[in-house]
Image: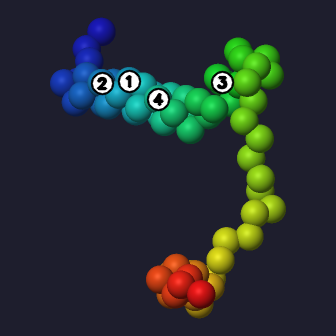
Amino acid sequence: MYLDPSFGGMLIQIIVAIVAGSGAIIFGMRRKIIAMFKKGKNDIPVNINRQTPDESEVVDMLSDEGNNSK
């Protein structure tokens, strides 16, 4: 059986793609994987409803910090 030399390169490329793809999937799902093994210990609550201030509110907060000498 004859294998073309480019077939070896293609085979190596497929193996590298599988390893890189698996690594990317594991990296993206690492929180879920860690949470699966943690079983609810020391869960940090995340407030997803937190309102972030807009630019004008930030400017007001920063300008009010220096003017607290009442």
Q: Are marks 1 and 3 in contact (CB under 8 Å)?
A: no
Q: What element carries label 3?
A: helix
Q: Tell me which label, 2 or 4, sits earlier in the chain.
A: 2
Q: Distance between the residues labelled 2 and 4?
A: 17 Å
Q: Which of marks 4 and 1 is in front?
A: 4
Q: Are marks 2 and 1 in contact (CB under 8 Å)?
A: yes
Q: In which quarter of the image is the N terminus?
A: top left
The residue that label 1 is drawn on is 15
- Tell me which residue sits at (75%, 63%) in the image: 50
Q: Residue 20, position in %: x, y?
A: 41, 32
Is 44 left or right of 24, judged from the image as shown?
right
Q: Residue 63, position in %: x, y?
A: 50, 87
The residue that label 2 is drawn on is 12
* Depicted 9 relative to depicted 28: above or below: above
The image quadrant that residue 54 belongs to is bottom right
Q: Quadrant of the C terminus?
A: bottom right
Q: What residue type is labelled 3?
A: Ile
Q: Distance between the residues labelled 2 and 1?
A: 5 Å
Q: Which amino acid does label 1 sit on?
A: Ile
Q: How far apart are marks 4 and 3 (CA)?
A: 13 Å
* Depicted 4 relative to depicted 1: above or below: below
The residue that label 4 is drawn on is 23
Q: Residue 11, position in %: x, y?
A: 33, 24
Q: Tell me which label, 3 or 2, sits earlier in the chain.
A: 2
